[in-house]
Image (cartoon, coloured by chain):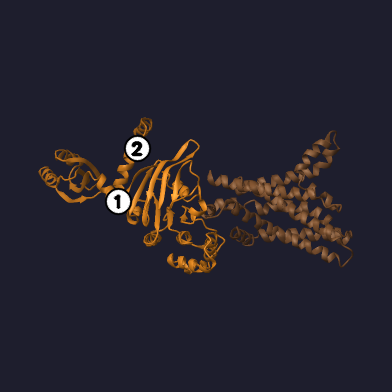
């Protein structure tokens, strides 16, 4: 797995993808930190993260859309299939490489509470639990998008699948308050909240450590990594 | 070394490999011959674990590829039809990556990489990006990666496709060199390539095996008839009429006709020398013979005979369709 991880991680820096992803995410982080923490004087980074989640969602398909399709197109998949490697090791190697890329802007966020401490009191527990939740949110979304990418050999089709998924989650998040206000909307919104990947972060904004969100992101991540392995294996053996 | 038993691969209703069974012994270069779409690549993909068979089994040195794929894959190096390369890596980086993936111990890794680079003569492109290299070099890198980890078996699927004549000669030399130390299986639809490289040949058509033997043995088995190639000055019709009288002649085919000279291939029963009779008959008819030589059965002849036999055993409907097509 480590050999696939190293190759994939390096590959993101052999073109602009890795640099653009990290740069744009840090740029948005900087903008929201300036807005919420420096201008509005919030000591917690949770507000920044809450705003950042919506901005980072459309960036994740940049990493995931061709993670499996590119190997199928170039024929490199046959090399991977003929090597003494398990399908799970190949998929996990690719997944952890994307997580490592995502971890770089997350690490940038992790420095911020330490800087804020020079300007006033910071609740580290709230800040770092929010950062952990943000990272797990990214991990879950990467896993979902990776699974969508494993469904086709066509990179454009994979990109379309990825963006439809992300738009669906954003639209659902935006529509939730509206649905709740409708008659019998409570029940519908409860059912839909299962799919609301963005909504799970809300308690962290109010300084509540919600273990359910952590479990939710971990479960979704694990489920879609498992499905990606199955999809990769199924297409290999078809 | 490789034992394939009752292998079947179906894509929906289409049977790509139909109950294929064969054994490939240790050492040497073994040819895998068949027309396009015969099922060569599918069979190779199943042998290397890239595809799952619908039925049957593949044993690599006694290890079943479907039951213990990791162990079986350690014994195999595979070059698919399109070399599986990462364009954005340098040659050296790519080979180190493959060696690591094949679990080559760290202390032997760079020695192994350097030795395969030396063997395939790609040391001069070690630091260059693969995407900037010629097809010939890419093919060599593809072959180099098959040798990493020192596998006993090397499978090469159409290794010379798309190469220029000079590159083809070099790759063939390399395959011959490999055949001295490893078991090499070369898949190709180029008859001359198989004839030049291989000790024995496995011919498949429509997913079925139609022959598996050394080229010499195939010649002997199918050599019930022998052939005589002649060039005669005269009218095609009168030459034909004259040759009809010759005893022992089983078949007569015109291979060319130019400036009043007709070239023919005369097939006759083995053990019967028809040269005197042919000479006398044509001399009497006033058709001078310009050249005459005994021609032995080439792999091309063997292949055509075998695939013809295969086609004649096909369903009458298919034959009718083909006949209908010819008439048009």
Q: What numbered label is drawn on residue B117?
A: none
Query: Residue shown at 22%/50% (left/top)?
Result: B295
| Residue contact between numbered discs 1 and 2, judged by CB atoms under 8 Å | no
Q: Nearer the viewer, residue B301 or A96?
A: A96
Tell me, yes or no, if residue A70 can be seen here: yes
Tell which chain the image draws in orange.
B
Label 1 Cα neighbours within 10 Å, binned few <14 / some 14-19 / many ≥20: some
Name the chain letter of the residue that bears numbered label 1: B
Q: Residue B215 carries which label?
A: 1
Q: Would residue A33 be found to the left or right of residue B142 on screen?
A: right
Q: Horizontal and vertical percent for residue A192?
A: 77, 40
Horizontal relation, residue A85 to residue A41: left or right: left
Which residue is labeled 2 in the image? B311
Which subunit holds the residue at mark 2? B
Q: Where residue A77 sits in the image (x, y, percent)?
A: 54, 52
Q: Where is residue B210 in the image (x, y as percent from the top left)?
A: 35, 42
Q: Residue at x 32, y 40 (%)?
A: B308
Give the spatial CA distance, label 1 vs label 2: 21 Å
Picture quarter containing residue B180? bottom left
- The reply to whether residue B162 is in sight is no
The percent position of residue A63, horizontal first and vertical second, equals 66, 54
Q: Nearer the viewer, residue B157 or B210?
A: B210
**Viewed as shown, does residue B260 lie left or right of B82?**
left
Q: Looking at the picture, tell me which residue is in the foreground, A203 or B135.
A: A203
Q: Name chain A's colour.
A: brown
**Which quarter of the rendering shows the C terminus of chain B?**
top left
Element at badge 1? helix
Describe residue A231's horizontal placement relative to residue A189 as left or right.
left
Earlier residue among tags 1 and 2: 1
Between disc 1 and disc 2, the foreground one is 1
Q: Toward which corner of the image does residue A1 lie, by quadrant?
A: bottom right
């Amino acid at each position: 797995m480590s050999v696939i991880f190293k190759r994939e991680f390096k590959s993101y820096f052999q073109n602009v993808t890795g640099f653009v992803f990290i740069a744009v995410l840090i740029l948005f982080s900087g903008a929201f930190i300036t807005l919420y923490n420096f201008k509005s004087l919030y000591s917690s980074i949770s507000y920044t993260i809450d705003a950042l989640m919506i901005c980072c969602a459309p960036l994740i398909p940049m990493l995931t859309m061709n993670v499996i399709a590119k190997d199928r197109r170039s024929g490199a998949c046959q090399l991977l299939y003929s090597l003494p490697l398990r399908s799970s090791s190949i998929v996990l190697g690719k997944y952890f490489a994307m997580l490592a890329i995502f971890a770089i802007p997350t690490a940038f966020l992790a420095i911020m509470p330490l800087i804020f401490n020079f300007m006033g009191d910071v609740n580290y527990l709230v800040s770092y639990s929010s950062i952990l939740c943000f990272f797990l949110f990214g991990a879950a979304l990467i896993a979902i998008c990776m699974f969508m990418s494993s469904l086709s050999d066509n990179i454009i089709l994979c990109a379309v699948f990825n963006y439809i998924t992300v738009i669906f989650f954003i639209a659902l998040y935006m529509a939730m308050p509206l649905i709740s206000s409708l008659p019998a909307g409570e029940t519908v919104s409860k059912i839909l909240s299962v799919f609301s990947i963005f909504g799970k972060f809300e308690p962290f904004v109010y300084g509540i450590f919600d273990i359910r969100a952590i479990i939710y992101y971990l479960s979704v991540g694990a489920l879609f990594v498992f499905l990606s392995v199955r999809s990769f294996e199924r297409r290999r053996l078809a | 070394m490789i034992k394939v038993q009752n292998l079947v691969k179906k894509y929906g209703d289409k049977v790509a490999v139909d109950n294929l069974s064969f054994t490939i012994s240790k050492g040497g270069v073994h040819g895998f011959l068949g027309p396009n779409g015969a099922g060569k690549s599918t069979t190779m993909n199943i042998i290397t674990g890239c595809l799952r068979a619908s039925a049957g089994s593949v044993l690599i040195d006694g290890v079943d590829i479907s039951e213990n794929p990791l162990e079986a894959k350690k014994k195999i190096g595979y070059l698919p039809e399109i070399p599986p390369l990462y364009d954005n890596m340098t040659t050296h980086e790519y080979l180190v990556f493959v060696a690591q993936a094949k679990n080559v111990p760290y202390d032997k890794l760079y020695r192994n990489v350097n030795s395969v680079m030396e063997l395939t003569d790609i040391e001069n492109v070690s630091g260059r990006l693969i995407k900037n290299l010629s097809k010939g070099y890419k093919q060599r890198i593809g072959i180099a990666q098959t040798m990493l980890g020192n596998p006993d078996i090397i499978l090469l699927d159409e290794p010379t496709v798309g190469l220029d004549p000079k590159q083809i000669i070099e790759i063939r030399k390399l395959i011959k060199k490999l055949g001295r130390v490893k078991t090499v299986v070369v898949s190709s639809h180029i008859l001359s390539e198989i004839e030049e490289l291989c000790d024995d040949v496995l011919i498949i058509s429509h997913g079925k095996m139609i022959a598996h033997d050394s080229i010499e043995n195939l010649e002997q088995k199918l050599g019930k008839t022998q052939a005589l190639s002649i060039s005669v000055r005269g009218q095609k019709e009168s030459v034909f009429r004259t040759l009809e009288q010759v005893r022992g002649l089983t078949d007569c085919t015109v291979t060319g006709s130019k400036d009043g000279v007709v070239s023919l291939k005369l097939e006759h029963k083995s053990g019967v020398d028809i040269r005197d009779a042919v000479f006398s008959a044509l001399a009497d008819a006033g058709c001078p013979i310009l050249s005459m030589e005994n021609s032995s059965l080439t792999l091309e002849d063997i292949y055509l005979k075998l695939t013809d036999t295969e086609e004649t055993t096909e369903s009458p409907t298919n034959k009718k369709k083909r006949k209908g097509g010819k008439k048009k």
